Image (tube, helix red, strand yellow):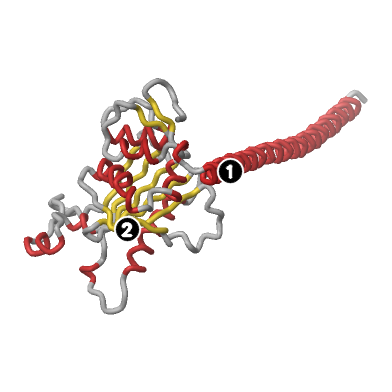
Amino acid sequence: MEQGKKGERVLISFDYAIKLLLRDKANFDILEGFLSELLMREVSLKSIGESESNKEYPKDKQNRVDILAEDVSGEIMLIDLQFEAELDYLHRMLFGTSKAVSERMVQGMKYKEVSKIYSINIVYFDLGQGSDYVYHGKTSFTGLHNRDELRLSEVQRQTFGKATAGDLYPEYYILKVNNFDDITKDTLDEWIYMLKNNIVKDEFKARGLQKAREVLDRNNLTPEERKAYDYAMEMRSKDLSDVSSARDEGKAEGRKEGLEEGREEGRIEREELKKELEKRDRERENLLAEIARLKQQSSR
């Protein structure tokens, strides 16, 4: 059995586990554990499938995994893991939730049947500016004058099981995994430690991790599955290396172009300065010649 340091167990990458193992109903409790720790409530899943939210994107999904999970109450969890930096990633999060809502609405459905959406984004790159490693965003309706939050009526609360108007709208979670300092202060941190390091320590108590450390053990894969897993990790590393190299080459080319542009601007400025100095020299020489002529005339 592959081991890390004493008291640790190295697991297969979580994104690959989602593709290969976690969609099996027998393993739902692993993902249920993660979602329960993140959302801070008990989550029981009814189904896990492929998300169609990014279907329009022709980009290769080697460095991205997105799934759609539905719990027993009909609420939707869009889970996206991304390794490669993407400038408009925040816009894609919005697109994903909007598409999930619209695709699940069929003609004749009432608006009250719109599902609550949780967008859970596990990113392995520096998204935006922020030093934390877990961010949560949700809609809030606040009065402009009284500063009170818009709450649901008693009938609405009983019908929808929510307290405020904002509770009906999508919520977003961003886990900036690489910002985590590996110091586990609570059970959610234990999950983030696993997401970052593919390791579960013996003392971890978070829901789902005990099952994960058994199911996601690389040695439990068949020889064919291990071969496929190793190849997938090799391709991911290659893809990320290619992207990083291309980005570095682009920066270097940009610096080169900027340097060459600066040199050209400097050359033009020097030529203009030279012409200006030459003009002043001619004017000075003409002035001196005129002074000499006037002196000569006055001496006659």
Residue furthest to the right in view is 300
**Of residues 217 and 109, the one drawn nearer to the viewer in this rendering:** 217
Report the residue at 49% width, 43% height from top: 222
Report the residue at 26% width, 62% height from top: 115
Quarter of the view holding residue 246: top right
Residue furthest to the front in view is 222
Residue 180: mark in rendering: none
Q: Which residue is mark 2?
A: 47
Picture quarter with the N terminus: top left
Quarter of the view holding residue 134: top left
Residue furthest to the left in view is 154
Q: Which residue is mark 1?
A: 231
Quarter of the view holding residue 295: top right
Q: Could you tell me residue 230's position as x and y percent? A: 56, 40
Q: Could you tell me residue 234's position as x and y percent? A: 59, 40
Residue type beneath disc 1: Tyr
**Of residues 174 and 183, the one drawn nearer to the viewer in this rendering:** 183
